Image (tube, rainbow, N blue to C red):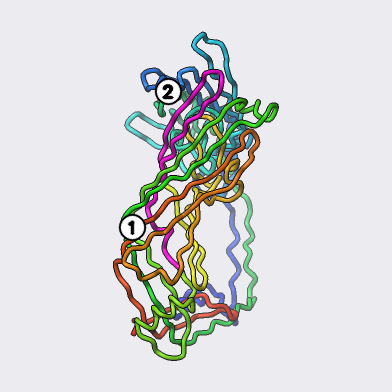
Amino acid sequence: MRAVLAVWAAAGLLAGAAVPAAAAGRARQENLNLTGSLTIAWSGDPARGCAAAGQCGISGSLEILPTGQSSGSPSVPLEVSDDNAVARVTQRGPTGAVQATCVDLVPVDLTLVVRRTAAGLRAEAQNAFQPPSSGRCAGPAAADLSSFSVPARRLGAHSFDLSGQSSFGAGPFTVTVLSTVRAHITITRTASSGLGIPGSRPAFPRVRTRRVLEESAQLEYRVAGITGTLTTSFAGLPAPLCQPLGACGASGRLSDTYTAAGEVTFAGSRAVHRRIGTTGALADLHAGRMTLGDNFGLLRIIQTASETIDEGDGLACSDQLSQAVSGGSSGRRGSDQLVLAAPLQPLGGADPVRTRCPGPSQLDVLGESPVLARGTVSAGSLGAQQLAVTLSAGGAFTGSAYAGQRGGSIVLDLALVRVTGGTRAVKVISIAGRVVSVVGSAAS
């Protein structure tokens, strides 16, 4: 509490403290203007096993026309952004004739960081808000394109010429990044008069503290294993809806398996008027007198997605990708709902239902929800030496070019490690009547 008040006092934010005017000066403004284009092209490579994956006839590209931005920071990040980037993919048969085409909108937003490497000055892709990929067409996935680089040369004191190319492998594909981008950075200074108002006395909500008794129970479990499979079956919609993505006559299946490691602690608490021991606290937890919570989101969970698709006309594809997914929960009295969640889209996460084969996207399959599967843990089951938590998926979906069905379940096996509980004295800090912090002593 003293620390909170000290910070506020130092900033002049407590009621009664005068706020000095900010010093006037000149603000530095750096303006970034990007010209040129960034093209990511790929083709099936026999040396990389394209025949076994059914990808030898694939060739495609993603063309990005970047835009620049202004920044007041001392160093402008080279942000490459194109909401209208388009992936175009062609699949040819053994005779060389075109058998299928796919065109998909793939918005891109990433940052290029110029740094000196053993190979010279390079612009490296980092911190992708919307990573490049082949979209719903056949080609490299977002994870494949998250760390490419292109040559960089200085143009004067602040600007860069990023023209050049680089190549690398991604699954059954050879990928070539071709850049004609130039990053022109200009620096301007604008007058700043300051925002402070001398003598002002801003009013802040009153901070209150009080001491209460808190009853709590905690049950720590170790992950012993995870079994089961989540499935997504899909097929192309009738023409003409299937035509832009080349999905006419296609049908496929995605099977997701998981590994997990770490510990989960289930916990509940409530304010009480008398001291209660460990046995009583566990009984109150089982009876639903406490709101359950957990640290399920701290588990390390890896999803392996295996896709097979029959594209019609004798074309077929198979691929497998692994990536981290996360856990989440929503506690209530008497139960705790756990969810397996996809990485946030489009906040840099790779699409969990995509591989390098064509097929539906997360938005097609899950809609706006990131939930891959969900399950419920009842308060009455906590305390068992072995606890099996089942998370299930289900429901039909219809996207822009594909429709299908989700199903299956996975079982998270947990082994009890430790049980604690009791009552402790805690200090409750509230602002404007709302509790913002609880600081407690040891349970008793």
Q: Mainly helix, strand or loop, the magenta region?
A: strand
Magenta stretch: give its range. Answer: 293-322
Q: Is residue 262 above or below residue 209?
A: above
Residue 296 painted magenta: yes
Instruction: Work out which quarter of the rendered image holds the C terminus and state it.
Output: bottom left
Q: What element does badge 2 sit on?
A: strand
Q: Please rate how many residues cluster around mark 2, counting C-alpha atoms within 10 Å: few if below 14, some from 14 to 19, many from 20.
A: many
Numbered circle sitting on residue 223? 1
**Image location of residue 159, percent across then percent down:** 51, 34
Residue located 48% across and 83% down the image: 271
Task: Name the one closer to the observer, 264 or 33.
Answer: 264
Q: Is residue 33 visible?
A: no
Residue located 62% across and 50% down the image: 190
Mark 2 — residue?
174
Numbered circle sitting on residue 147? none
Question: Mark 2 or 1 closer to N-term?
Answer: 2
Q: Are marks 2 and 1 in contact (CB under 8 Å)?
A: no
Residue 299 position by quadrant? bottom left
Residue 284 position by quadrant? bottom left
The residue lying furthest to the bottom in this view is 274
Residue located 49% across and 28% down the image: 139
Task: Name the one closer to the observer, 342 or 410.
Answer: 410
The three-letter amino acid code for the residue at tag 2 is: Thr
